[in-house]
Image: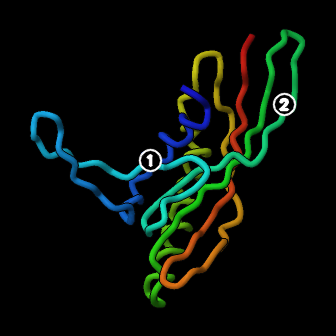
Amino acid sequence: MSIIKSVQDYLTTYSGMELQEVKIEETETGQSLKVIGKVLTDRTEEEACSYALQPVGNSRTKTDILGNKTYENDYVFYAKEASADEVDRQDNYSFMESLFEWLEEQDEAENYPLLPAKYKAENLSVANIILFELEDNVSLYQVQIKLKYRKER
């Protein structure tokens, strides 16, 4: 598993993702399966209720005497939501503010994404809720996320 996949999976644990559409898919045996939408990579789907995580930078910030390295990865989380009327737009900001607060709470509790072997998350910060794009009745919102992690030698 990659680090970005770990962060995507982590974001799906946020219980406030109720704005996300729930899809019903049939398994090979004909059973109905409830599938919560995914946090995609780089871009959202065309329709509303779609989420994505895009890497926007990374750097090594420190190497200690034992060769352990500390990195910072920057991401943008996108939420594409319906925005036809004022109520929709207010709900969208409420969702983004709630996600922001949840991420801050997770950092305070040191509850971080489970990263691949040899990697350990140390800090998660969040900033800048922004309306990124407005088209007809759908808007794209974003929030910036920074993950600091350590790779042990």
User: Where is 98 relative to 150, above or below?
Assistant: below
- Front residue of 128/50: it is 50
Could you classify mark 2 by the number of other residues whose Cα lies within 10 Å: few (under 14), some (14-19), or many (20 or more)? few
Q: Which mark is residue 91?
A: none
Residue shown at 58% from the left, 55% from the top: 43
Residue 88 is drawn in which quadrant?
Answer: bottom left
User: Where is 133 relative to 49, above or below?
Assistant: below
The image shows residue 94 at horizontal and vertical percentages of 50, 73
Q: Are marks 2 and 1 in contact (CB under 8 Å)?
A: no
- Amino acid under label 2? Arg
Q: Name the residue under label 1.
A: 12
Q: In this view, does 22 lie to the left or right of 6?
A: left
Q: Name the residue under label 2.
A: 60
Q: Is mark 2 on a helix, strand or loop?
A: strand
- Amino acid under label 1? Thr
User: Where is 119 relative to 6, above or below?
Assistant: above
Quadrant of the snapshot with the C terminus: top right
Could you classify mark 1 by the number of other residues whose Cα lies within 10 Å: few (under 14), some (14-19), or many (20 or more)? some
The image shows residue 144 at horizontal and vertical percentages of 69, 56
Instruction: Looking at the image, tell me whether mark 2 or mark 1 is earlier in sequence order.
Output: 1
Residue shown at 29% from the left, 57% from the top: 22
Separation of residues labelled 2 and 1 (CA atoms): 27 Å
